[in-house]
Image: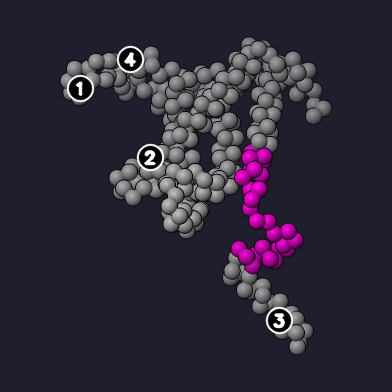
Amino acid sequence: MTNPRFQWATVGAYFLDGEILHGLELTLWLTAAVMATGYVLGIAVAAMRLSGNPVLSGLSFGFVWLMRSVPPLVQLLFWYELASLYPQLSLGVPFGHAFVTVRTAHLFSGLLAAYVGLSLDVAAFSSEIVRGGLLSVDRGQTEAAKALGLGRLWTFGRIVLPQAMPAIVPASGNLLIGMLKATSIVSVIAVQDLLYSAQLIYNQNFQVIPLLLVATLWYVLLTTLLSIGQYAVERHFARGSRRHPGRGFRDVLRGNAPLLGRSLRGRSLRDQPAGLS
């Protein structure tokens, strides 16, 4: 920390620079927009995957497989270069008259390409998070609610979803923090986020390390705040869960690893003095 090459005075001078704050604003906006859109799409994909319709289930599986197979940076470059594949998009009668025609070179800017590419990536991962959380709820809960005459929406909103949230929130928080940091890749397609703003400045004054430290400190601050928020949300949804105070390490192993638990119990019986077993 005392290395003079860090140039902490320069870091402090640029920490609240207008260019940096403008990039920070775009980073926060892009993260919020991508997460909101991605989770709306992810919930729809998860519902399709859990449905009994083989067509919907197959389509959702194919979407998740494709989005998780292609790196986010490749997706951004693909959407950014969409005009090379489709110079224009038209809306009208198939193989007939087009009512509206838009040139993709003017439509897909760097920011829109980043928004679309990252939203699709979040949709794929969030759908698996939501699906895993819903599957963690015992089916007996739904059957009991149906036996009581409760509707599907009431059952989902008041019984299934609250029990699924403890499994959904931690993974969703990790996805949010990861997406905040992943927005830095949009600098490749010249979107002026936090990192790209720092790059623009150090390309002019050649203060590379201090400007990278400015971006790093902002990312650390934001991820810390999000981690605190995630902890508070997790405590909110876990407030009704059963706790087991005073459980030892051996008790945890017995409860979660039956085979290992039996071996531990057998060993404890062998270690007892004669007459106590």
Mark 3, mark 1: which one is toward the viewer?
Answer: 1
Which SS class for mark 4? strand
User: Which mark sits nearer the N-terminus, 3 or 2?
Assistant: 2
Q: Residues within 10 Å of mark 4 (few under 14, many from 20)?
A: few
Q: Is 250 included in the stretch rendered in magenta?
A: yes
Looking at the image, is mark 4 or mark 1 nearer the viewer?
1
Marks 3 and 2, how far apart in space?
55 Å
Q: Residues within 10 Å of mark 3 (few under 14, many from 20)?
A: few
Q: Secondary structure at mark 2?
A: helix
Residue furthest front in the image: 149
Distance Cα–Cα, label 4 vs label 2: 26 Å
Residue 99, quarter of the rendered image = top left
- Quickly name the residue at label 2: 63
Q: Which residue is mark 3?
A: 270
In the rendered image, the vertical position of residue 57 relative to residue 178, given as above or below: below
**Which residue in the protein does label 1 denote?**
93
What number is the disc on residue 103? 4
Mark closer to the chain start, 4 or 2: 2
- Residue placed at 47% from the left, 25% from the top? 115
The magenta span reads 230-256
Distance, label 4 to label 1, CA atoms, is 18 Å
Query: Which corner quadrant of the image does residue 41 belong to?
Result: top left
Q: Secondary structure at mark 1?
A: loop
**Viewer-proximal residue among 7 and 158:** 158
x then y, percent, for residue 202: 64, 16
Q: In the rendered view of the protein, which quadrant contains the N terminus?
A: top right
In-image side of 180 versus 271 (left or right)? left
Alpha-carbon distance for marks 4 and 3? 79 Å
Q: Residue at x 42, y 47 (%)?
A: 151
Instruction: Give, as a three-letter code, the residue at label 1.
Output: Val
State the residue in front, 192 or 254: 254
